[in-house]
Image: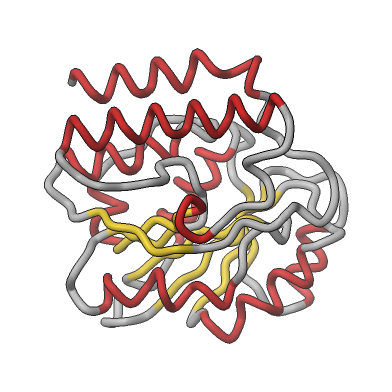
Amino acid sequence: MKPGVVSVAVLARDEEATIEEVVRAVLPFADETLVVDGNSVDRTRELAQGLGAKVFLDGGGGKGDGIRKAIEVASGDVLVFIDADGSHDPEEIPALVAPIRAGEADMVVGSRWTGGSDELFGDIGKFIRSTGSAIITLAINYRWHVKLSDSQNGFRAISIRAARAIKLDEDIFTIEQEMIMKCLKQGFRVTEAPTHEYRRQAGDSQIVVWKVWYKYVWCLIRNLVR
């Protein structure tokens, strides 16, 4: 691993409508561009390979499976995670990477609370998501004496040393809060930078809060008390 080398992992499943635009936008900010595909049944992998991205299949277990695959295959010493649906702005990658390169942090989470979001507000489902996110973040802050505003945003950067040390277990989107808690438990420095979340450009969100809320609660409790 070379100092300062940035690997960007685009996490995708059935995102043929946006994958080319996202990969093209990522390329200027990545020394290595990875697309980790959750067993798409459309042309996501084909289109990504056509742009020169390194494409890997995860085990089909959910977003957590894709994140673990990215950690396994990345060759850089800073790893950025970004979604393939166009909701994140690749031009904000340098702001996430800079504190890690400067030796000031081991993980930097993109904060939608300070950077703004087009997805967190507007209906009852989004209200539940934003409220639940705030409660989980508050619990993390009190447990580890930090001042984070967003524990759920998947747009983030982490040193590969920290990523491989924390041994992530979660399979769904709960892996994002697990990543923060395990970093803090092992003494890694976690901070955040403002990033804006845009509305996904195609398809629907894969998070159905009323079906999985208890998994977020159990993941939080399990990591708070361990």
Residue 22: quarter of image:
bottom right
In the rendered image of this protein, does residue 10 appear above or below residue 69? below
Q: Quadrant of the N terminus?
A: bottom left
Q: Position of residue 27 (x, y in %)?
A: 61, 81
Q: Nearer the viewer, residue 70 or 126?
A: 126
Q: Residue at x 71, y 35 (%)?
A: 206
Q: Position of residue 106 (x, y in %)?
A: 24, 61
Relative to 226, is 4 on the left or the right? right
Q: Residue at x 54, y 18 (%)?
A: 213
Q: Nearer the viewer, residue 100 or 114?
A: 114
Q: Nearer the viewer, residue 28 or 40?
A: 28
Looking at the image, the residue that sits furthest to the front is 122
In the rendered image of this protein, does residue 9 appear above or below residue 95? above
Q: Position of residue 26 (x, y in %)?
A: 61, 76
Q: Quadrant of the C terminus?
A: top left
In the rendered image of this protein, does residue 178 appear above or below residue 218? below
- Identify the coloring: secondary structure
Relative to 2, is 132 on the left or the right? right
Q: Residue at x 16, y 37 (%)?
A: 144
Relative to 225, is 176 on the left or the right? right
Q: Position of residue 143 (x, y in %)?
A: 18, 30
Q: Nearer the viewer, residue 220 or 5?
A: 220
